[in-house]
Image (cartoon, rainbow, N blue to C red):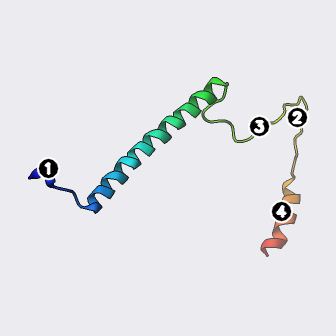
Amino acid sequence: MAADFIPPIRLQISVWLASFATVQRIFWTLLLQAHILLYMSLGGHLSPPLSPPLPRSDNNYNIIVHSSDFNQQLLPHFS
């Protein structure tokens, strides 16, 4: 008698969706790991710098701002 039991369609659909979600999660996890391994094997890093390093130069330019010039530029805006 128990072998004649057919679960309701909602239960069948929910079990199918749960198993599909699990398979999909495993697939994307493995794909992400494969991409990370490939990227690392090609000499990449997991956290690449956001911008390329600035070129180094032997010239050291210092911009000097005198406080009197700074105050003359700012005071008219705040008064």
Q: Which residue is mark 1?
A: 3
Image position of 15 with respect to 53: above or below = below
The quarter of the displayed image where residue 51 is located:
top right
Q: Which residue is mark 3?
A: 52
Q: Which mark is residue 60?
A: 2
Q: Which one is in front in this view, the residue at disc 4 or the one at disc 1?
A: 1
Write the residue at 29% across / 62% down.
Answer: 10
Instruction: Inspect the image, locate mark 2, and give the three-letter code of the amino acid beneath it.
Output: Asn
Q: Residues within 10 Å of mark 2 (few under 14, many from 20)?
A: few
Q: CA distance from mark 1 to mark 3?
A: 67 Å
Q: CA distance from mark 4 to mark 1?
A: 90 Å
Q: Which one is in front in this view, the residue at disc 1 or the one at disc 3?
A: 1
Q: Which one is in front in this view, the residue at disc 2 or the one at disc 4?
A: 2
Write the residue at 24% across / 61% down.
Answer: 8
Q: Nearer the viewer, residue 73 or 51?
A: 51
Tell whether 36 sits left or right of 9. Answer: right
Instruction: Inspect the image, locate mark 3, and give the three-letter code of the amino acid beneath it.
Output: Pro
